[in-house]
Image: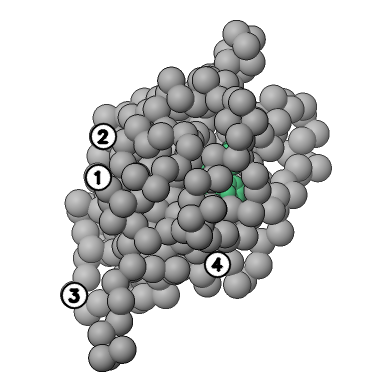
Amino acid sequence: QNGHKKYTRVWCDGCYDMVHFGHANSLRQAKALGDYLIVGIHTDEEIMRHKGPPVFTAEERYKMVRGIKWVDEVVEGAPYVTSLDTLDKYDCEFCVHGDDITLTADGVDTYHLVKSAGRYREVQRTAGVSTTDLVGRMLLLTKNHFKQGCSQFLPTTQKIIQFSDGKPPKPGDRIVYVAGAFDLFHVGHLDFLEKAKEHGDYVIAGLHTDPVVNRYKGTNYPIMNLHERVLSVLACKYVSEVVIGAPYTVTKDLMDHFKVDVVIHGDTPVMVDEEGTDPYQYPKNVGKFVVVKSGNDMTTERIVERIIRNRQEF
Ligand code: CTP
Ligand code: C5P
């Protein structure tokens, strides 16, 4: 060793259908094992063959992974069984995966090649969240779901610290504030936050509490509880800071406290607050309210519809 630290390129691959903070957490751990993280994502055809139909299209899945802050590069249409050729082609030293076995349709370990070549590393899978679990929550459209809560995930301050940048705004940074439910963080949210980020340097996302979201979304929403939503939003590369349980109404106090320059909302409908007034009245009065068009019509409700439709067809 002559003092030069080796530069390590790391490979991850998967379906990344319905990207959740469990996926993000595995990519975070993978990135920490090296310097540059490349994520290979399977095509719809490959997923169809080995697992069944994906809920999201390849374009949506690629975009969601590109939005995660630990990801440096995405390889579209990566093979289901990770080959040494693939690692070599992208100059990656090893492949990283969670500590669960994934099999092909023929029952072969998708990582057997990289494992026997000693080019496989394992990270801890996040307990309490999976696509199957989220689909289960969505199908469980019972009225008392919200009161009971059905998340098995145990949030800790450690996890929040690991996901957070821990960086305050720099002097002169233009501060953008956005608020919402950000339930089942999806491509619509991602496109919205990308647009919001163009209006400033430091994006603060205020996440409403579960009872607040339930007041305006009804039935069993939110599907993900506040702590889970916090991690999903923190994993997004456009977001610098998250308010854990933001007030529904954006007040002068809140704007002064965070030194907010502009408050941004997408072009989705805004529900009035409990007094029947516009939650964005104050920023509108002071000329600090902007509407951006995400250009994406994805909503949490549409995801639920897709899941139910998928269920009926297969
Ligand atoms: N992963 C994880 N923790 C979870 C879910 C997934 O660490 N709770 C990891 C997997 O171990 C894998 C990566 O995320 O390394 C992407 O894998 P993918 O094929 O998308 O994941 P699945 O295991 O199918 O995830 P899910 O069951 O949630 O669809
Ligand atoms: O609906 P929710 O509260 O999660 O939305 C958070 C923010 O994302 C809102 O500003 C909303 O307008 C925006 N959004 C968007 N396009 C979508 C979905 C949400 O601009 N397709």
| Numbered disc 1: secondary structure | helix
Q: Amino acid at mark 3?
A: Gly
Does residue 111 appear anywhere in the picture? Answer: yes
- Decide which of tag 1 and tag 4 comes sooner along the chain: 4
Say if mark 1 contacts mark 4, CB within 8 Å.
no
Residue hosting label 4: 160
Q: CA distance from mark 1 to mark 2?
A: 8 Å
Q: CA distance from mark 3 to mark 4?
A: 26 Å
| Numbered disc 3: secondary structure | loop
Q: Which mark is residue 231?
A: none
- Decide which of tag 1 and tag 3 comes sooner along the chain: 3
Q: Horizontal and vertical percent for residue 54? A: 51, 25
Q: Report crowding for label 4: few under 14, some 14 to 19, many 20 or more residues within 10 A (C-alpha).
A: some
Mark 1, ligand 2, within 8 Å: the answer is yes
Residue hosting label 3: 172
Quadrant for ligand 1 reads top right
Q: CA distance from mark 1 to mark 3?
A: 20 Å
Does residue 193 appear anywhere in the picture? Answer: no
Say if mark 1 contacts mark 3, CB within 8 Å.
no
